[in-house]
Amino acid sequence: MTDNLGKMLNKIKNAILVKHEAVLIPYTLNNFLILRILEQEGFLDSINIVCKKKKREYKYIKVYLKYNEQTSKSFIRNICRLSKPSLRVYTNSKKIPRILNGLGIIIVSTSKGVMTSKDAYSNNIGGELLFSIW
C-alpha cells in the first residue's frame, strides 16, 4: 500500500527547500482535489494536468509553487501531517483545531469530500484531519 498523500507533501516540501518553480506529482483524484484547494487558498500559484507517454500514458499534476517576489520566500511556511496510515485522526466539527489563529488551514476529508477546516466547521461536518499548512 502506498501513501500518495505523504509522497505529495514531501515532494512539495523538498521543492520549496531548493526553490524550484514547479514540481510534478503523480495524478490521483485525491491529490488533484487537495491541490485545487491549496490553489484556491493562495498557497500555490497554479496547477495543470500533464500527460507523459512512455510505454503507456501517465498523468501528472504540474504544481507551480508561489513565492513572494520581494523576499523570494515561499507562501508555504510549513506542512504538518496529522493523520498517517498507521494512526488516523478523526474529529467532529466542534473540535477541529485552529492553526495560528486562523492564518493556517487544515485539510479535512469528510463524507462530503475534501475541504478546509473552515468549510467543515461552517457545514457542521467532521472527518479525518489530513494535514495542516501555513
Image (cartoon, rainbow, N blue to C red):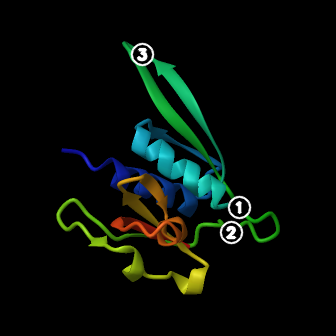
**69 or 82, nearer to the observer:** 82
Outermost residue to the top:
55
Answer left or right for 31 relative to 4.
right
The residue indicated by pointer 2 is 73
Q: Is residue 18 above or below residue 101?
A: above
Q: Is residue 28 above or below residue 64?
A: above
Q: Is residue 68 left or right of residue 48?
A: right
Query: Label 1's element?
Result: loop
Q: Is residue 111 left or right of residue 67?
A: left
**Residue at point 54% right, 63% down?**
17
* Residue on which the image places disc 3: 54
Q: Are marks 2 and 1 in contact (CB under 8 Å)?
A: yes
Would you call the spot at circle 3 few (<14 residues within 10 Å), some (14-19), or many (20 or more)?
Answer: few
In front of the other: 64 or 118: 118
Most distant residue in the right direction: 70
- Marks 2/3 in contact by CB < 8 Å: the verdict is no
Contact (CB < 8 A) between labels 3 and 1? no
Residue to which mark 1 is pinned: 67
Which element is circle 2 on? loop
What secondary structure is marked by label 3? Answer: loop
Spatial CA span between label 3 and label 1: 32 Å
**Residue placed at 57% from the left, 72% from the top?**
77
Between residue 53 and residue 133, name the one nearer to us: 133
N-term mark: 2 or 3: 3
Q: Quadrant of residue 132?
A: bottom left
For badge 3, the amino acid type reads Lys
